[in-house]
Amino acid sequence: MKQLFKFIFLFVGLMPAVAQEYNPVANPQAIVQEGRARFTVLTPEMIRIQYSEKQKFEDRATFAVVNRRLPVPQFTTEREDGYLVLKTSALTLKYKLGSEIKAGRPDDSVLTICFNLNGRNVTWYPGKDDALNLKGTTRTLDGQIGDNKRAELENGLLSRAGWSIIDESPKTRRGDGSTTFAFDKSVDGIEWVAQPVDKNAIDWYFLGYGHQYKKALGDYIKVAGRQPMPPLYVLGYWYSKYQRYTSDEFMEIVNDVKRNQIPMDVMIFDMDWHTQGWTGWTWDRTAIPDPEGLIDWMHQNGLKVSLNLHPADGVDEDEDFFTDLRDDMGMAADTKVVPWNLSDGKFYHNMFNRIIRAREKQGVDFWWLDWQQNLTSKYVDGLSETFWCNHVFYNDMRLNRPDHRPLIFHRWGGLGSHRYPIGFSGDSFTTYGTLAWQPYFTATASNVCFGYWGHDLGGHQQTGPNDPEIYLRWMQYGVFTPVFRTHATNWDGIERRIWKYENFPLLLETVKLRYALMPYIYTAARQAYDTGVSLCRPLYYEWPEEGKAYQFEDEYMFGDDILVAPVVTPSGADGKASRLTWLPEGKWFDVCRNAVVEGNRTFTDNYTQEEIPYFYRAGSVIVNYPPVMNLNTRPDRLILKVVPGADGTSSLYEDEGDTEGYKKGAYTTTRLRHEGNQLTIEPRVGSFPGMPATRAYTVEFLATERPASVLVNGKQQASGVWNYNEQTKVTTVYVPITLCDKKISVEIQ
C-alpha cells in the first residue's frame, strides 16, 4: 500500500501543477570536467558521461534528453592514484585521468561505476553487455505473427542487472537506423533539428537505479519530458478500417452504431479519403463529395475525425494547392512534384500553411501519420523520418490549435517519442499467437514511457474467414489497453463492424466495459503524466524480486489496482478456454468469480467466452461511469466499486478533457478512502473551468453479506435508498446529488 499512498499524495498534496519548462543546460555545480571528459550528476542514480577529443560538449537538448537543469544532488569528488573518484549517495564513479573513453569493446580500465543491488556490489564499465535488459519497444508490428517481433525490441531504461544506458552519442544507431540530433533555433516556434557540436563524441547517461523501476522512470521524465495526457475522447472506442467508404457508407456505419446503442468517440478516414495512390492530399470527391459537410455531420453525432497520411511522396502537380506550394518554394514553373522534405523549415512552413491548415479548417481533428517509406531522411543523413514527423506534427498542433490538446497517431521513432502521443502499432496478423504476445509488447513499452500504443483490435491481416471468438478475445483484451480501436486491411472479407457478428451482445459488452472504466483509466493517464508510470505496466514494477513477475509476461497491471490476465487461446470442446495465472502476494477480488482470493499463488481456471480474467486489488475503490454513448458530456453520477479484503485509498482525477490547462493546475482530485465497511468520499480539491458543482453516487460494496443497516453521513437509511443482491453479494447504496466539495461517508453495518 505504500506505493498507492505515494500516488495519492502526488494528487492531493496541494502542490500546484506547473507546465514544465525544459532547460538543457545543467547547473554548473553539477558538472565535473576533467580534460576531454565531462560528468554531470543529474540525480544520485543518474550521471551523464561525455567524452570529446575536441572538448566540445553538447549543452543543447537532444532527441531523448531535453532538460538537465535539475536540483544538484550531493556528491563528492577527489583525485587519487591517477583517478577521478566521484561519489553520490548511490553511485561511485572512477575515471582514469587523461584516458580516452571508448564505445565498443568491454574495458574496465578507464571508467567504472559501482553501486549496490540487494546487498551485492555491481560494477559497470563501457562495453558491458546488458543481457538482463527488460527491453522497450520497436517501431512497428507490421508483419507480426506470434512473437516474431521479439528480437526487434530495443533496449529500455530498466534492467534486472540494475543499470542501463541512454546512448545519445551522435554516431550511435537507433532501432530504425537513425541517429540522435540536437534541437536548436526554432522554425515557427518549433525546436528544429541541428547537427551535434562533435559528431564523434561520447554522450551516455548511466542509470543505476537497481530494481527501483518506478523511481527510474520518474527521474527519466524529468530529463526526457513527461508523457502528455491525450484528450479524453482518445480513450473511447474508435471505428477504423482500410476501405474506400463513401460518405453514405460512413453515415450508415454511424447510424448503425447509434441504432445498436454502441458507445463511440472516433471515426477514422483511412487513406482512401484522398485521390492518388499511397500519398495524397486532395479529397476524392467521387466518394466524399462534401468533405466539410460529412465531417460536420460526424461532429454533430459526437465523433472526432482523423485522416490517414502517407506523406513520403510529396505533393504532385494534380493536387489541391500544388501551384501555390510550388511558388512558395520558389520552384520552376515546370516542376511536377514538390518533394517531401520536412527537415527544411521553409518546406514545413509552406506545406502546413497551404495544405495541412486547409484540411484542419475543414474539421479534421487530428492526423494519423502512417509513415512507411524510407526510414531516414534523404536530405539529413541519419535523421529519422518517423521521429521528425512526430516532433513536427505534434508541435504544430500544439502551437496552431491551442484550444485543443495536441495529438497525433503515429509509430515509435526512438527515445523521446513518448512526448508525442499516441502510437499506432501497425499491421499484425489475426492469429492467437499474435494476440498472446501483444499484452507483453504493450506493457513492456512502458519501460521507455511509450504508454499509448494502439493496436488493430482483431488483427490487421487474416487469411481465413472471420472468427467471432478471436475477435471477441481481442476486444476483451482491448478493453484493458491504452487505445481501444478496431481496424483491418482492405480485404472485403474482413469484417470489423461488431454488430455484424453472431456474438455481437458479447462484443458490445466489451465496449460498455471500456466506457464504464473511463474515470479509472483517465486517472491513470494523469498518473502517467506525473510519474512516468504508464497505464499498462509489467508486474515487476510492483514485485521486482519475484521471479514470476517476469515469467508471466502476458499478465500486467492496468493502472494501480487492476491486474489483467487476458484469455489468448481458443476455447476447447466444452466452450471454455484454460488460463494459467499468477496472482502476486496480498488479497485480490476475482471479478469473474465474484470473490476475494489469496495471492502469492499460481492457478489454472477455465473461462467461458463472456468471461475476462481480471482482478481488483483488495482495498481499492474502482470508479466507473454509468452507461454513456460518448465522452463529450460528463455524467452527473458515478459508480464506486468498493473492493473488500483490505483497507485502502484511491483517487479520482478530472479536468477539462481536451485542453492544456491540466499542465497549469486546472484539474481536480477526489480522494476515496476505504476503511473496514466504510467508504469516505473526501471533499474535492482543485478546480477547472466547467467542473460540476454536484453529483450523485452509486456505491457498490462487493462481496458482502446482507447488512443490518446502512448509514450515509452517520444517518441510518431506509431500505429504498439501498438494496442487497443475494446472487451477486453486492450491497448498493444510492447517494443523492451532493455538493462535490462536501465530505460523504457511506457505511454498511
Image: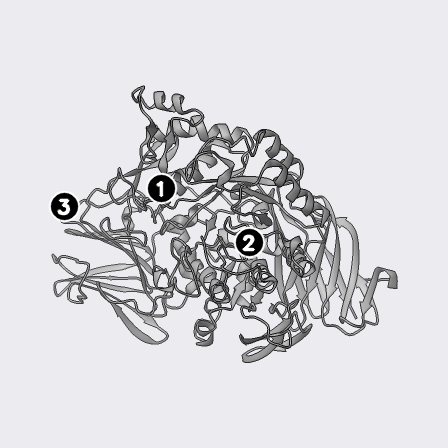
**Looking at the picture, does residue 313 appear above or below residue 438?**
above
- How crowded is the residue under tag 2: few (<14 C-alpha within 10 Å), some, or many (20+)? many
Q: According to the image, label 1 marks what residue?
A: 388
**Looking at the picture, does residue 682 appear above or below residue 419?**
below
Residue 546 screen position, x and y as percent: 45, 76
Q: According to the image, label 2 marks what residue?
A: 494
Quadrant of the rendering where the N terminus is positioned: bottom right
Q: Nearer the viewer, mark 1 or mark 3?
A: 1
In three-dimensional space, the C-alpha distance between marks 2 and 1, rounded to whole angstroms, equals 33 Å
Front residue of 552/648: it is 552
Q: Residue at x 81, y 68 (%)?
A: 724
Q: Is residue 445 left or right of residue 635?
A: left
In primary-sequence order, the first of circles 2 and 1 is 1
Q: According to the image, label 3 marks what residue?
A: 54
Q: Residue at x 74, y 63 (%)?
A: 700
Dividing the picture into quadrants, the one containing residue 153 is bottom left
